Amino acid sequence: MAPNLVPQLTAAPVKTQMAPNLVPQLTAAPVKTEFPIFISGEVVRGFGRGGKDLNVPTANLPEETVNKALATIPIGIYYGWAQLETEKKEVHIIHNYEYDFYGRELKVCIAGYIRPELNFESLDQLIAAIKNDISIAENALEKEPLLSLKEHSYFV
Ligand SMILES: Cc1cc2nc3c(=O)[nH]c(=O)nc-3n(C[C@H](O)[C@H](O)[C@H](O)COP(=O)(O)O)c2cc1C
């Protein structure tokens, strides 16, 4: 896949042959939906793969909650803002927490779409893609109009 090619939005998972330095630079959102999408729920245990193998701890919400709230949008990599329980400060969804928060309420505001979920040939490729996702998300969230979403009344 050439670096600037937007992956086709076919049903995930999609087999790809991306080298780590050829991860797509996606900025546009080819998903037809209205953002933001608000979703909240109690953090449940995932496979533990995110933290252990990828060094990207992942907060999982219950499958029913996610399926219901996100039924109309394709499986993929999205980004946005999140808030853990009543903590006053809003947190980036890619915030590094020093502790586990299973069982606590997480509010998520999905602000945009990055790419579909892909099958990578190696863990290193997946990690490279995730790092790229994180910089795309950070770039988008530090600018308006997505920056102000952090102050949305949903998070009060
Ligand atoms: C930003 C981001 C992008 C991801 N992209 C993919 C992907 O394209 N393909 C894939 O199989 N998994 C992808 N993952 C999921 C991880 O492989 C892992 O399954 C996930 O972090 C869940 O971890 P858990 O085992 O702690 O529940 C992604 C995770 C993150 C945080």
Image (spheres, rainbow, N blue to C red):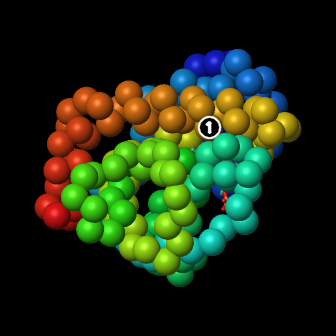
Whether residue 67 is visible, yes or no, is no
Does residue 54 lie above or below 37 as drawn? Answer: above
Residue located at (36% from left, 63% from top): 84
Residue 148 percent location from the top left of the image = 18, 42
Residue 11 percent location from the top left of the image = 67, 55
Quarter assignment of residue 112: top left
Residue 60 as seen in the image, left or right of residue 87: right
Residue located at (78% from left, 33% from top): 124
Whether residue 123 is visible, yes or no, is yes
Residue 10 percent location from the top left of the image = 65, 49
- Which residue appears farthest toward the bottom when viewing the image? 64
Residue located at (25% from left, 29% from top): 143
Residue located at (37% from left, 46% from top): 92
Quarter assignment of residue 152: bottom left
Q: Which residue is mark 1?
A: 130
Residue 129 percent location from the top left of the image = 65, 33
- Pick whichever, 39 or 25, lies toward us: 39
Task: Locate the C terminus by quadrant.
Answer: bottom left
Residue 69 as seen in the image, left or right of residue 144: right
- Which residue appears farthest toward the right when viewing the image? 121
Q: Residues within 10 Å of mark 1 (few under 14, many from 20)?
A: some
